[in-house]
Image (cartoon, rainbow, N blue to C red):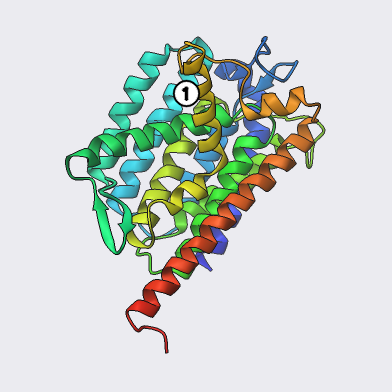
Amino acid sequence: MEYLKITFIAGLSCVVLILTLRKFAHYLGMLDHPDERKLHGRVVPTVGGLAMFAAVILALLFSSPLPHGQIILLFCAAALLVMGWIDDIYGLSASLRLMIQVVLVLIVITESDSTISQLGTIWGKPITLGLLALPLSLIAFVGGINAMNMIDGADGVAGSMAAITLVGVLTLIGIGSVNMSVALPVALLAALVGFLIFNSRIFVRKAWVFMGDAGSMWLGLVVVWLLEQVSRQHTEPSIMLWLFGLPLIDTLAVILRRISRKKSPFKADRTHIHHVLQRFGFSTGRKMALLALAQSLLVAIGVILDAQIQFRSATACGCLV
């Protein structure tokens, strides 16, 4: 019953907040203006990220008290939201954004015990990272933040990617022995659904709102944190790569392409997968549908692989009768 309440509050709050904040987007400076590398041709409010975050916080007020680690996570997510808000208005330099992300991620990792300490097992032996645990954890978290930011370039894409990943996370939590509250992922998933009503082209002809940098970066942080927590308690860390799926693939492909052309990996261009699909003549709605299908397949593979790992583990220890 608690989770139904959280779902209802987060989803409804997000819808109401978007409808309200759109009217004040000009005063908040939260407007996305078209340019040569963007796919839209009109000014669009970027209040989606703020609305989602406020909806999640409001819903969590009606849940059981959050553990310390999740409270730290949400404070750092709020700081990323503010940074993204400023970036949307003034356009911060890539180096400054990266520096702030690193500081916030270090706080999350150290204060919520979120260090990735091993990469899984080979022939029954864990691959521990030792002294490399902290720097690799830092790379994984910062990479996840920017991957979600980079995939956010077409109506409904980033929101649907995150929502599908969260379905996979909740599935793994449901089938495994994970000692964590699901209030946060449930609230976030409900808020994403509320956002997608106005951002995807399922219910509206053109997106009414974007999440903006203010939304994509804090969303990436929370999603990666949830993946780390599930992998730590339940399954092989490599499974989480399948669940993050398309944002990870797109980001790695874009960075490698930019480096091969001797360009900065942080310099924006039109080489993301949604740009490629546009050049092949795909409409915005079809792009979202195709990418959502691809993400769903990747997440499904991850869940199936996890089930196989758990089955083999249970068989090896004689837990199955």
Would residue 177 appear left or right of 213 to someone viewing this image? left
Q: Is residue 6 left or right of residue 197?
A: left
Seen from the viewer's position, the closer of residues 255 and 286 is 255
Q: Residue furthest bottom?
A: 321
Q: Is residue 62 visible?
A: no
- Disc 1 marks a residue whose amino acid type is Gly
Report the number of discs: 1
Residue 138 visible to the viewer: yes
Please name the residue that numbered disc 1 is placed on.
Answer: 84
Task: For the C terminus, give its image quadrant.
Answer: bottom left
Q: Residue at 68% x, 13% y: name it.
A: 34
- Where 107 falls versus 293 (above or below)? above
Where is residue 100 shown, x and y percent of the image? Answer: 33, 23
Tell me: 286 left or right of 221.
right
Secondary structure found at label 1 = helix
Query: Is the residue 99 above or below the residue 68 in the image?
Result: above
| Image coordinates for residue 243, horizontal then vertical, percent | 51, 50
Task: Give coordinates of residue 23: x percent, y percent.
Answer: 67, 25
Residue at 42% x, 22% y is 83
Which is more toward the observer, 198 or 316? Answer: 316
The residue at the point 24 percent across, 42 percent down is 133
Q: Is residue 216 above or below residue 125?
A: above
Seen as rendered, the residue at the extreme front is 123
Q: Say few, some or many: other residues with alpha carbon within 10 Å of mark 1 (under 14 / 14 to 19 / 20 or more).
A: many
Q: Quadrant of residue 207?
A: top right
Could you say which is closer to the camera, residue 236 or residue 63? Answer: 236
Q: Where residue 266 sits: x, y (%)?
A: 46, 17
